[in-house]
């Protein structure tokens, strides 16, 4: 391959390595692209605002998926595993691990540039990815800063603080761009902190508004917590952003925070222009088991009880599947999607009723699910053709302890896992019925889900295998070993008439595709050569 240019840039104390195999400049991700992404793009964390992680691409089918082969692999040479969902715009993929952003040619897998944030003391637990608007990328780093990079060369435009790492915050989520707002959230439940969503100006980084999940620290009888560490979704028709919030603190001891502990473990609807709360639904009132409701609020327009409705679906960490009317937050369906033993039933609002006898105690309580939850950060998918909500589930049991000696700060207790496994479940969104399950192995799963119009479901198991399943039945149609744990969610895109499925494991990004025809190989060669 003929290299056109190679340069080493220094920006704001960071290192940006640029290697350009061809004149390839991603740019111009405007509001129209975010609202209606073309097939050759994946311009935001969920692909689309609705969080369905479903693609209309259908070149890879039930009949030919068995022929999938590796098109290319990209090695990050980092110890940190990839947890991010790559963005794709104008033929360039952008993905992250903590402190690092790569731009990679989506056709060839060749590096375009690499940005490294300076060493810092933030918690390097992982990074989910980036947001993009116009020619700019938005990236949260472990020490609580939001970085804006030039998508063309990785140079730094500005760096601003959005959370104070010295207080115990860290930041790891992929920003969500809505209109002229870059929405970011916080992490940090090792300390008693207030979780919040902040809107930053995409041009300057200046704070536009902030919504706090809990009252100011020190408010008598009030919880702290409610961190907003996963990316939300957006309905442009209602102009509402939907976001899940994390657990209250102290985490496993609730005596100092009686009541429901709003707005922790909640799904909230906010006006993205003002940050004003429109409605709230709480999947886990008075949580004492670390069951964040931060899981993706998936937006679906579909029939429910004989009526076309604007719905919100969430498979929650607490073991329940919820269907809400997203116009007002009213619950339409609450059912468990695995073993749960911590609730007495469901109240009139559709919320599980915590059983006081299942709160952690000094001598321990057997609880299902475990602290990892029935599901977690890994993304679900929704296939409108089948009406199936596909989720990576985790039936599990744990012993929960309260530890009075720990006081009322941070965890204030402990849990010890006894047993758990990974299962892919296909849930009928209208009834909550589990239509099929696919065993994934013993342990805690970490790979997310992608579905396509051709009836395929892509994911990964606990042994590091990439899987293609039949969406309607869960039958395995193809698999390939990756050599390491899969901790991200697949995406798919099409370039030069060829569909790719992108997965990762460890520190390697893998692109899978069907074998090329001779005509396609010629087109790819011309593309790589920049001719």
Image: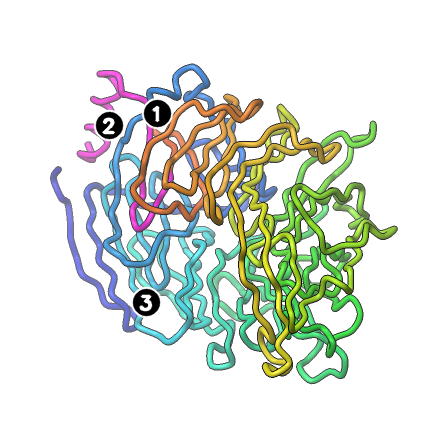
Tell me whether the residue at label 1 lies in contact with that at label 2, contact meaning CB atoms closer than 8 angstroms.
Answer: yes
Q: Image check: 120 left or right of 472?
A: left
Q: Which residue is mark 2?
A: 524
Front one among 315 and 22 = 315
Question: What residue is drawn where x is 46% and y is 18%?
Answer: 62
Question: Where 20 sits versus 165, above or below?
Answer: above
**Where does residue 407 sit, x and y in percent of width and height?**
62, 83
SS assignment at label 2: helix
Q: Quadrant of the C terminus?
A: top left
Question: Residue 272's mark?
Answer: none
**Where does residue 330 sit, x and y in percent of width and height?**
81, 48
Tell me whether the residue at label 3 lies in contact with that at label 1, contact meaning CB atoms closer than 8 angstroms.
Answer: no
> Which image quarter: residue 158?
bottom left
Question: What residue is drawn where x is 59% and y is 73%?
Answer: 413
Lower position in the chain sequence, tag 2 or tag 3: 3
How crowded is the residue under tag 3: few (<14 C-alpha within 10 Å), some, or many (20+)?
Answer: some
Front one among 411 and 488 = 411
Question: What residue is drawn where x is 45% and y is 51%?
Answer: 134
Q: Image check: 3 left or right of 248?
A: left
The span shown in magenta is 503-531
Question: What residue is drawn where x is 66% and y is 45%?
Answer: 339
Question: Residue 498's mark?
Answer: 1
Q: CA distance from mark 1 to mark 2?
A: 10 Å
Q: Tell me, what colour scheme is on the image?
A: rainbow
Question: Residue 117's mark?
Answer: 3
- Taking the magenta stretch, the answer to whether it contains residue 530 is yes
**Where does residue 71 sit, x and y in percent of width and height?**
27, 31
Q: Image check: 102 left or right of 388?
A: left
Lower position in the chain sequence, tag 3 or tag 1: 3
Residue 182: in sight, yes or no? no
């Amino acid at each position: 391959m003929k290299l056109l240019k190679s340069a080493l840039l220094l920006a704001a104390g960071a290192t940006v390595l640029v290697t350009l195999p061809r004149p390839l400049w991603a740019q111009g991700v405007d509001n129209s692209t975010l609202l209606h992404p073309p097939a050759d793009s994946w311009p935001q964390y969920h692909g689309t605002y609705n969080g369905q992680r479903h693609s209309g691409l259908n070149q890879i089918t039930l009949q030919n998926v068995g022929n999938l082969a590796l098109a290319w692999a990209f090695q990050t040479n980092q110890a940190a595993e990839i947890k991010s969902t790559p963005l794709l715009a104008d033929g360039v993929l952008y993905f992250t691990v903590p402190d690092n952003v790569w731009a990679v040619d989506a056709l060839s897998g060749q590096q375009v540039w690499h940005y490294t944030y300076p060493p810092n003391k933030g918690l390097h637990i992982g990074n989910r990815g980036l947001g993009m608007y116009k020619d700019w990328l938005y990236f949260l780093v472990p020490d609580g800063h939001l970085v804006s990079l030039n998508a063309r060369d990785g140079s730094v435009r500005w760096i601003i603080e959005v959370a104070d790492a010295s207080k115990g915050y860290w930041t790891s989520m992929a920003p969500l761009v809505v209109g002229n707002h870059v929405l970011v959230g916080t992490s940090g439940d090792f300390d008693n902190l207030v979780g919040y969503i902040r809107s930053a100006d995409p041009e300057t980084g200046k704070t536009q508004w902030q919504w706090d999940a809990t009252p100011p620290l020190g408010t008598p009888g009030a919880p702290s917590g409610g961190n907003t560490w996963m990316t939300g979704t957006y309905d442009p028709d209602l102009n509402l952003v939907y976001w899940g919030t994390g657990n209250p603190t102290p985490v496993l001891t609730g005596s100092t925070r009686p009541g429901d502990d709003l707005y922790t473990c909640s799904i909230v609807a906010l006006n993205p222009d003002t940050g004003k709360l429109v409605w709230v639904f709480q999947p886990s009132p008075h949580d004492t088991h670390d069951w964040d409701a931060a899981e993706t609020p998936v937006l679906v327009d579909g029939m429910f009880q004989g009526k076309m409705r604007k719905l919100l679906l969430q498979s929650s960490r607490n073991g329940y599947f919820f269907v809400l009317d997203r116009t007002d937050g009213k619950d339409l369906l609450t059912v468990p999607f695995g073993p749960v033993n911590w609730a007495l039933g469901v109240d009139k609002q559709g919320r599980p009723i915590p059983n006081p006898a299942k709160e952690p105690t000094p001598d321990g309580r057997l609880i299902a699910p475990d602290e990892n939850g029935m599901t977690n950060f890994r993304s679900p998918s929704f296939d409108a053709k089948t009406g199936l909500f596909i989720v990576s589930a985790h039936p599990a049991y744990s012993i929960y302890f309260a530890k009075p000696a720990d006081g009322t700060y941070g965890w204030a207790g402990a849990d010890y896992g006894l047993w758990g496994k990974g299962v892919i479940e296909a849930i009928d969104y209208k009834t909550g019925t589990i239509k099929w399950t696919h065993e994934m192995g013993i342990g805690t799963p970490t790979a997310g889900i992608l579905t396509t119009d051709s009836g395929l479901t892509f994911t990964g198991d606990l042994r590091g295998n990439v899987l293609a399943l039949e969406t309607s039945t869960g039958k395995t149609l193809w698999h390939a070993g990756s050599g390491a744990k899969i901790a991200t969610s697949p995406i798919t895109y099409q370039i030069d008439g060829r569909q790719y499925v992108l997965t990762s494991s460890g520190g390697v990004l893998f692109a899978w595709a069907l074998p090329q025809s001779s005509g396609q190989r010629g087109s790819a060669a011309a593309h790589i050569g920049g001719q």
